[in-house]
Amino acid sequence: MPYKTTWLANGIIWTYSGVLTGNELLNSNFEIFGDERFDDIRYQIVDLSAVEKVEVTENHMRKIAHLDMAAARTNPRIKVAVVSTTSIASDLRVFNTKNTPAVNRRGSHRRSPRSPKRKHG
């Protein structure tokens, strides 16, 4: 199985492995958003530590951002933690730099951090 969803009393753990595809990310989101337990969860742990490669497009990430914004209106109390290797985090972070806003679970946009401006002279 490319990903596993584990429901806990107040939360959910997604465990992904191998090649992470945009369709798997979308399907895992659809799976929990349509579940009656979604309104009761308070946290999500997204475990990407066993992911070897990312095959996700900017379009996939845009869809996921829109799903997250809609879900945040239903359950704004969810906190999200992501566990990943540095290389996988870098592969996903590239979408923040291509005019795709990062979205937190409360539905508000946040910009990706920028490097400090250099002082000339």
Image (tube, rainbow, N blue to C red):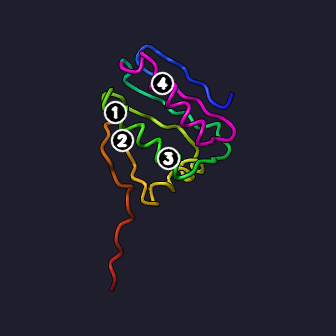
Residue found 56% across the figure and 49% down from its top: 86
Q: Earlier in the sequence, mark 3 or mark 2?
A: 3
The local crowd at label 3, few if under 14, some if 14 to 19, many if 20 or more residues have their Cα within 10 Å, is many
Q: How many labels were placed on the picture? A: 4
The local crowd at label 1, few if under 14, some if 14 to 19, many if 20 or more residues have their Cα within 10 Å, is some
Q: Residue 44 in magenta?
A: no
Looking at the rendered structure, the kind of residue marked 2 is Asn
Image position, residue 27 (x, y; %): 56, 32
> In the picture provided, is 68 more to the left or to the right than 13?
left
Q: Residue 32 in magenta?
A: yes
Pointer 3: what residue? 61
- Taken as a whole, is the magenta stretch helix, strand or loop? helix
Q: CA distance from mark 4 to mark 3?
A: 17 Å
Q: CA distance from mark 1 to mark 3?
A: 16 Å
Image position, residue 68 (x, y; %): 40, 37
Q: Earlier in the sequence, mark 1 or mark 3?
A: 3
User: Which numbered disc covers residue 37?
Assistant: none
Labels 4 and 2 touching (C-beta < 8 A): no
> In the picture provided, is 61 more to the left or to the right than 54?
left
Pointer 1: what residue? 72
Tell me where the magenta segment starts and ends, as one range.
14-39
Pointer 4: what residue? 32
User: Which numbered disc covers residue 104?
Assistant: 2
Q: Earlier in the sequence, mark 2 or mark 1?
A: 1
Looking at the rendered structure, the kind of residue marked 4 is Ile
> In the picture provided, is 28 more to the left or to the right than 2?
left
Q: Earlier in the sequence, mark 4 or mark 3?
A: 4
